[in-house]
Image: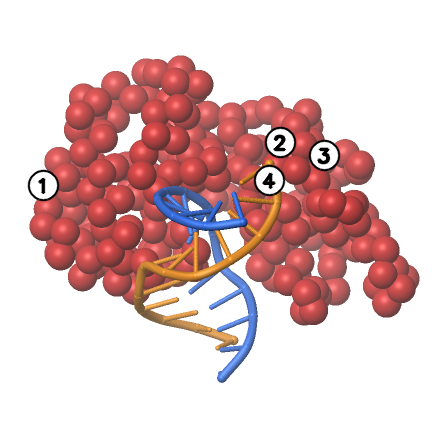
Chain colours: A red, B blue, C orange
DNA sequence: CACCAGGGTGGTT
DNA sequence: AACCACCATGGT
């Protein structure tokens, strides 16, 4: 398989540095990771703004908030009942562990296990939180990366998640570049590496081998 | 109208 | 382990 470093270089050349290091603190990033599930960042960001406007984007206030108030703020981000309940559990989790500083002091392994035990936090969200909120070297394996890998390799069956993780880890090991790589994969996936049959003219198509007669050119 | 958007959970086979 | 329905709104 093509080295991940080559793909990284091609994506960077095609799209430029994304600089996705979100600000406004770890807890907001954790909440954002839950809110953005199966929706757009635009919708999630609006929900974040509404929560912040009511001072609900802090562990203490959110854990004590009325669920209906949270639902009102985040309705536009979809699955609002489910996500409101999960946000409450996330806030409670942080409070019960003595605040963010206590969590930040934990080793990555332990922190990941704690995150995975949370309602609504699976592998992708846990790694996104580790990377973006806690600045740990985590590989985010999402649908865009799977699609990109499948187009790169035309493998049948598609590469498994652990293989994708290893593929990235062997090329990139620091959080800043893992962050940038993930951002580039997402941007590329949104702009051109679209679901079939609307796969666009790909900037890194020289690296792709789709195996189909129409696009093998 | 059909499909997609930075998933995860619980139940079924 | 693989597969499925479900959660729900907003944009194209």
Q: As displayed, is residue A141 above or below residue A189?
A: above
Q: Earlier in the sequence, mark 2 or mark 3?
A: 3
- How many residues crowd mark 3 within 10 Å: few (<14), some (14–19), many (20+)? some
Frontmost of labels 1 and 2 is: 2
Q: Is A154 situated left or right of C3 in this image?
A: right
Tag 3 residue:
A5
Q: Is disc 2 in the same subunit as disc 3? A: yes
| CA separation in Å, label 1 and label 2 | 38 Å
Q: Is disc 1 in the same subunit as disc 2? A: yes
Q: As displayed, is residue A161 above or below residue A158?
A: above
Could you say which is closer to the camera, residue A8 or residue A149? Answer: A149
The residue drawn where x is 18% and y is 61% is: A72
The residue drawn where x is 41% and y is 25% is: A112
Looking at the figure, which quarter contains the C terminus of chain A? bottom right
Task: Tell me the quarter of the picture where residue A212 sits.
Answer: bottom right
* Circle number at residue A162: 2
Q: Secondary structure at mark 4?
A: helix
């Amino acid at each position: 398989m093509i080295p991940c470093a080559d793909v990284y270089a091609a994506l960077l050349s095609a799209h430029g540095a994304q600089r996705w290091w979100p600000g406004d603190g770890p807890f907001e990033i954790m909440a954002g990771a839950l809110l953005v599930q199966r929706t757009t960042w635009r919708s999630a960001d609006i929900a974040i703004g509404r929560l912040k406007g009511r001072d609900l984007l802090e562990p203490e206030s959110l854990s004590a908030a009325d669920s209906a108030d949270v639902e009102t703020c985040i309705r536009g981000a979809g699955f609002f009942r489910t996500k409101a309940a999960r946000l409450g559990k996330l806030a409670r989790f942080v409070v019960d562990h003595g605040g963010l500083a206590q969590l930040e002091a934990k080793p990555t392994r332990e922190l990941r296990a704690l995150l995975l035990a949370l309602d609504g936090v699976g592998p992708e969200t846990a790694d996104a939180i580790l990377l973006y909120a806690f600045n740990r070297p985590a590989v985010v394996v999402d649908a865009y990366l799977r699609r990109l890998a499948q187009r790169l390799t035309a493998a049948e069956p598609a590469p498994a998640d652990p293989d994708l993780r290893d593929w990235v880890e062997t090329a990139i090991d620091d959080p800043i570049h893992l962050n940038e790589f993930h951002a580039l994969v997402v941007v590329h996936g949104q702009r051109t590496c679209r679901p079939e049959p609307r796969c666009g003219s790909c900037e890194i198509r020289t690296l792709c081998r789709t195996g189909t007669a129409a696009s093998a050119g």
